[in-house]
Amino acid sequence: MAHQETDCLFCRIVRGEIPAKVVYRNDHVLAFRDISPVAPQHVLIIPLRHIASLSDLSPEDEGIAGQMLLAAGTVAGILGIRKSGYRVVFNSGPDAMQSVFHIHGHLIGGKQMGWPPFPA
Ligand code: AMP
């Protein structure tokens, strides 16, 4: 098993200790539905291995970073929104309101979204 943290919520989901609605899994990543969706489709894509945030990625993590992005297209296909479009958001740190410190990409879609995502 890849490096895990005992008390990390998402490591616990990887280990099956906490239930999740899994959409996709391979040898590197897990994708499951967000418990509090902000869009008709909202899936979190995480590495099986514990990495706290985008800012904690190191050059040796190049492979897993790529795996997360590759999984986004795969998951979008599973959700049926690959052609209609989707957004992938990595919140990192306090200003971005990161609340779970196991890196995750929010894949959201299923509706037309605005840009920029906040008022000017
Ligand atoms: P962030 O604020 O970017 O760290 O996002 C953390 C996300 O994890 C939030 O969108 C939460 O709704 C989601 N979340 C928290 N606990 C769970 C859980 N047990 N299962 C699925 N999603 C969760």
Image: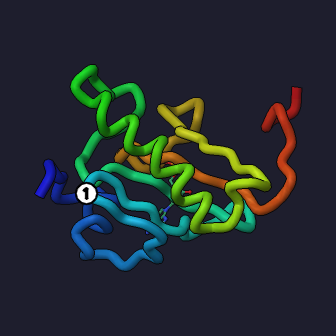
Residue at image position (65%, 65%) is 37
Q: Does the residue labelled 1 lie within 8 Å of ligand 1?
A: no
Left or right of 75, for residue 55: left
The residue closer to the viewer here, 119 or 66, is 66
Where does the image place residue 47, in percent across and percent down from the top left?
A: 33, 49
Residue 52: which quarter of the image? top left
Q: In the picture, which quadrant includes the N terminus?
A: bottom left
Which residue lies under the disc numbered 1? 27
Where does the image place residue 35, in percent across and percent down from the top left?
A: 54, 70
Left or right of 49, for residue 81: right
Packing grade of label 1 (10 A; few <14, some 14-19, many >=20) is few
What's the residue type where badge 1 is placed?
Asp
Residue 77: which quarter of the image? bottom right
Left or right of 84, for residue 58: left
Q: In the picture, which quadrant includes the C terminus?
A: top right
Where does the image place residue 62, in percent across and percent down from the top left?
A: 31, 28
Where does the image place residue 8, in percent across and percent down from the top left?
A: 27, 56
Left or right of 4, for residue 99: right
| 107 in relation to 90, above or below | below
Residue at image position (38%, 43%) is 67
The residue closer to the viewer here, 63 or 120, is 63
Residue at image position (75%, 50%) is 85
Q: Is mark 1 on a helix, strand or loop?
A: loop
